[in-house]
Amino acid sequence: MLRLYGRTPHSEPARGEEADDIAQGGELRYHPLRREWNVYAAHRQNRTFKPRLSEDPLAPTLPGRPATEIPFTDFECAVFDNRFAAFHPEADDAAALAGLESEPARGACDVLVYSPEPEGSLATVTPDRRQVVLAAILDRYSAHFDAGRHYVLPFENRGDEVGVTLHHPHGQIYAMDRVPRVQRDAIAAFADGYDLAREIERALPEYGLGSRGGITAFVPRFARFPFEVWICPLERRAGPWECDAEELESLAYWLGEVTRRYDALFARPAATMMAIHAAPNPAIEAARGFHFTVQFAPLLRAADRVKYLAAVEQHSGVFTVDVMPEAAAAALRSVGQP
């Protein structure tokens, strides 16, 4: 299903029919030693891979051009069901394998298109458009929670180094019926009394990039990636749905500003992995003390050097960080407002 978001009503009639060939999701299998559930979706092997500009599936559908996922000549922000979904509300039953836990990958996968323009980023779209994008994310949180999904993860992969196959500016939203291990560990840490607001107080100003409207951007003192940045409210909020209007406006600002600073620092469009780490569905599971963050994990440690997740990181979870967090914060402050 296609959903349009914007400041003005959209009255243009659709050009053609919406695509209905959506993959029915994959299956989950439990890793007994890592104590995590991973999703297996073989159909994703054939997903769209770096199409020509004239075949951009996230562009508007223009006269004389092939139909795209968005059957209109213009739009502000669009969300539609991922045709190559890893999670689906009607996922088929999982394979029965002796001695192994498995289950259908029930959930949903959205594609979130920021703009009709084929190039750009959260830094180059207007501040108003970033607010529309954030409003779309909030609406999808609400819809997925109402549908009974346990966890919702809005995220963005950007850059060839991350493995991006579509360069049109966009993000994704995964809604899952299980809370992933990383977020489960965070829930436990907050429940045990971890105080992120206190950590931010200790980190600022040395590790800070700036604060505005109740939202701060900073380099965690315990960052795992060179130039890693977190955005979060100074006061505890379980998710962006608890933010007031000023905080949401400031959150939208920092989404663009952090992206801009990465591009300025590396003098190129920077490869990053960004995700909103919020609490699980409050109607299903309480998450006492949870403090949400937006986390940016850059894939560059210098303009011409990729941060690879090699043997030690992959096999032990112990990251080797090549840039000290205090040096990273200073470098990102140095490319402040132009």
Image: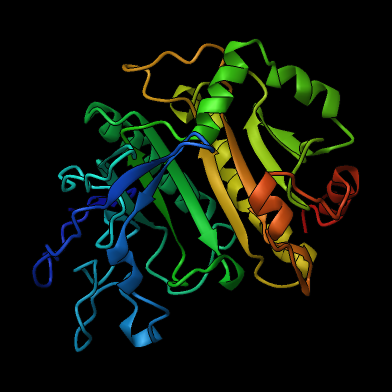
Which is more toward the observer, 115 or 228? 228
Q: Quadrant of residue 154?
A: top left
Whole-percent x, y for residue 31 in the image: 45, 41
Residue 247: x %, y % from top left? 56, 29
Describe residue 315's horizontal placement relative to residue 219 as left or right.
Answer: left
* Placement of 247 over or under 294, stated as above or below: above
Above or below: residue 220 compared with residue 125 = above
Q: Position of residue 46 (x, y in %)?
A: 31, 73
Q: How is the image coloured?
A: rainbow
**Quadrant of the rendered structure where residue 203 is?**
top right
Residue beneath the point at 54% across and 51% down: 127
- Is 232 positioned to the left or the right of 119 in the image? right
Vertical position of residue 122 compared to residue 92: above or below: below
Residue at (57, 63) in percent of width and height = 124
Residue 182 relative to residue 109: left or right: right
Residue under the point 47% across and 22% down? 242
Camera-nearest residue between 133 and 167: 167
Residue found at the far front of this picture: 98
Q: Is residue 258 visible?
A: no
